[in-house]
């Protein structure tokens, strides 16, 4: 059973007050939970004395048993929210017990956001911190490969009467990714609601434990997945990754503006300029500015946000990602030092 099946079934239930179906009316909360043939979710009503409440709840239950399976066990939670009461999408009740919850964002793909996230997570773990990492790039999960654990499969544990997913631990980092649960050779073709619900389960139904840092590798761009994570977690802030290339800087600016929007209002911790220059292995002192010089540095100054670091474009970073051994594990490597310096900036 998949969340989309639940959504499709609820399209057959109309709210008598408007004549629209529950999905069209925006009454389904984004909290679908599925375990075998058991499903739970919330339906939003404007007031607790709604005359149609009981009939709608019963009709929703019957719809799931009719259009999905007669053996489905349904648990529906009525939620009462006035239409004009939602002025902010931030939810300050975070299910993650971490001192710092940091999202890593890029305006466009291909700028090395996941590489930066992986190396930053390992750098923090090497410094003695308890680190969790969520690969939130549903359609292009790369962390299993970057951490050399593509064949790993999380198992369940019992904790205080709940069945939770045990994250995979590698290089001192606890990690979960949708890549652990799907065929790596097949594309993940999910609607936005399905992807958002999958991520919420990886956050809320996982045995993360007590953490110092919880890093989130966001998908590139701006989407409903970003808003789901923002509403599910109390973020300490966001780190924006870009290259110096003008086309990347345009999208990085959009990302900053999204998080600065008054309804989102998430602090920008700083900007990382990746692929800042090319340094060949045989000429380690030389710098070639293939994508332009100091574009990220200039953008950070313009937007009045900290420049956390500039990462060079070197072959060993790419090789480390492909081989599943982050370059930060190579003591004394110039790129490793750059990532370690960024980790230190976060601790100031």
Image (cartoon, helix red, strand yellow):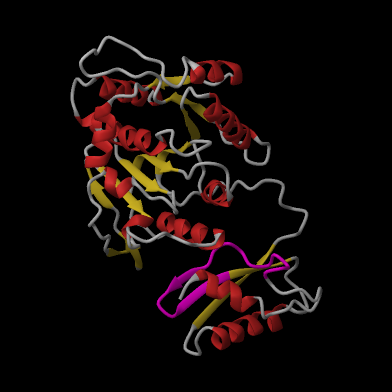
Residue pictured at 69% horizontal, 72% vertical: 22
Q: What range of the chain is rendered magenta?
A: 23-41
Q: Nearer the viewer, residue 127 or 189?
A: 189
In the image, what residue occupies the spot 35% across and 44% down?
133
Percent position of residue 214, x then y: 39, 41
- For the residue pair 312 and 201, the one nearer the viewer reads as 312
Residue 165 on the magenta segment: no
Where does residue 340 sit, x and y in percent of width and height?
A: 30, 24
Question: Can residue 208 be seen from the camera position used here?
Answer: no
The residue under the point 81% across, 73% down is 18
Q: Taking 18 as reference, is 184 left or right?
A: left
Determine the residue positioned at 54% across, 86% down: 65
Q: Nearer the viewer, residue 186 or 207?
A: 186
The image position of residue 110, as x and y in percent, is: 43, 37
308 vs 130: above or below: above
Q: Is residue 29 magenta?
A: yes
Task: Examine the image and state in which quarter residue 348 appears.
Answer: top left
The spot of residue 139 in percent (x, y) is 44, 53
Number of numbered discs on residues = 0
Asked where in the image residue 28 lies, by quadrant, the reply is: bottom right
Seen in the picture, residue 301 relative to 109 is either above or below; the reply is above
């Amino acid at each position: 059973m998949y969340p989309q099946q639940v959504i499709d079934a609820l399209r057959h239930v109309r709210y008598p007050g408007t004549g629209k179906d529950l999905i069209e009316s925006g009454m389904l909360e984004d909290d679908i939970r599925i375990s075998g043939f058991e499903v739970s979710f919330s339906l939003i009503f404007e007031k607790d004395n709604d005359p149609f409440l009981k009939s709608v709840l019963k009709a929703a239950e019957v719809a799931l048993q009719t259009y999905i399976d007669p053996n489905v066990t349904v648990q529906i939670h009525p939620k009462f929210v006035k239409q004009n009461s939602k002025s902010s999408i931030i939810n300050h009740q975070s299910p993650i017990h971490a001192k710092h919850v940091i999202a890593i964002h890029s305006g466009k793909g291909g700028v090395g956001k996941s590489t930066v996230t992986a190396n930053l997570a390992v750098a923090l773990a090497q410094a003695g911190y308890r680190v969790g990492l969520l690969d939130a790039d549903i359609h292009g999960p790369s962390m299993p490969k970057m951490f050399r654990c593509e064949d790993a499969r999380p198992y369940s544990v019992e904790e205080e009467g709940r069945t939770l997913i045990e994250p995979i631990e590698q290089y001192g980092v606890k990690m979960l990714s949708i890549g652990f649960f799907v065929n790596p050779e097949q594309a993940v073709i999910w609607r936005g609601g399905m992807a958002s619900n999958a991520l919420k389960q990886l956050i809320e139904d996982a045995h993360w434990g007590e953490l110092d840092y919880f890093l989130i590798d966001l998908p590139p761009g701006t989407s409903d997945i970003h808003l789901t994570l923002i509403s599910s977690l109390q973020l300490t802030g966001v780190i924006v990754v870009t290259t110096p290339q003008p086309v990347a800087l345009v999208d990085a600016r959009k990302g900053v503006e999204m998080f600065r929007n008054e309804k989102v209002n998430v602090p920008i911790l700083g900007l990382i300029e990746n692929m800042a220059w090319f340094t060949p292995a045989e000429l380690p002192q030389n710098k070639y500015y293939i994508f332009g010089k100091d574009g990220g540095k200039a953008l950070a100054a313009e937007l009045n946000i900290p420049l956390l670091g500039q990462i060079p474009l070197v072959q060993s970073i790419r090789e480390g990602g492909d081989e599943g051994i982050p370059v930060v594990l190579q003591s004394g490597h110039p790129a490793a030092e750059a990532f370690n310096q960024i980790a230190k900036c976060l601790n100031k």
